[in-house]
Amino acid sequence: MTNQIKCECGSWMMLRTARRGYNAGNKFWGCASYPRCKKTQNYLTQEDIEAAEQRVYDAYEARATMTYGDYVMELYENAPYQGW
Ligand SMILES: [Zn+2]
């Protein structure tokens, strides 16, 4: 298990697939204690993470005034994945 993540409540997050709504078919992490705990988290594939890093890198290149701290913050905002 390389990318198993833990919920804030201490349970493991389970990979689930949305069945309805605007993101139907998309995978997401849902707490194993559902419905007691309703925490969810975006599921990002390695490609998603790399694409987010590339977008941030492009933005960093485009905006020479951006500090490295801004760059890191934007990276985290674009890829809200706690398992890395
Ligand atoms: Zn939980």
Image (spheres, helix red, strand yellow):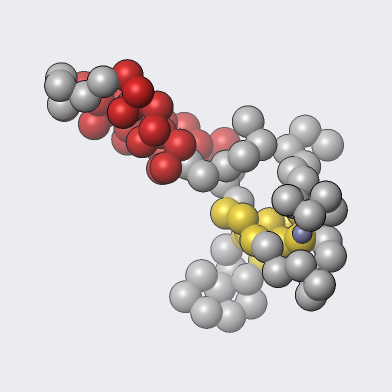
Ligand 1, image quadrant it occupies: bottom right
Give above or below for 51 relative to 66. Answer: below
Give above or below for 7 relative to 67. Answer: below
Image coordinates of residue 34 in percent, x first then y, are 79, 70
Given residues 57 and 74, the one toward you in this image is: 74
The residue shown at (83%, 61%) is 32
The residue shown at (83%, 50%) is 10
Give above or below for 37 relative to 8. Answer: below
Image coordinates of residue 75 in percent, x first then y, are 41, 33
Q: How many marks?
A: 0
The residue shown at (73%, 38%) is 3
Asked whether the viewer can see residue 12, the reply is: no
Image coordinates of residue 31 in percent, x first then y, are 76, 60
Q: Residue furthest bottom?
A: 20
Given residues 47 and 61, the one toward you in this image is: 61
Asked whether the viewer can see residue 66, the reply is: yes
The residue shown at (61%, 55%) is 41
Q: Quadrant of the C terminus?
A: top right
Q: Quadrant of the N terminus?
A: top right
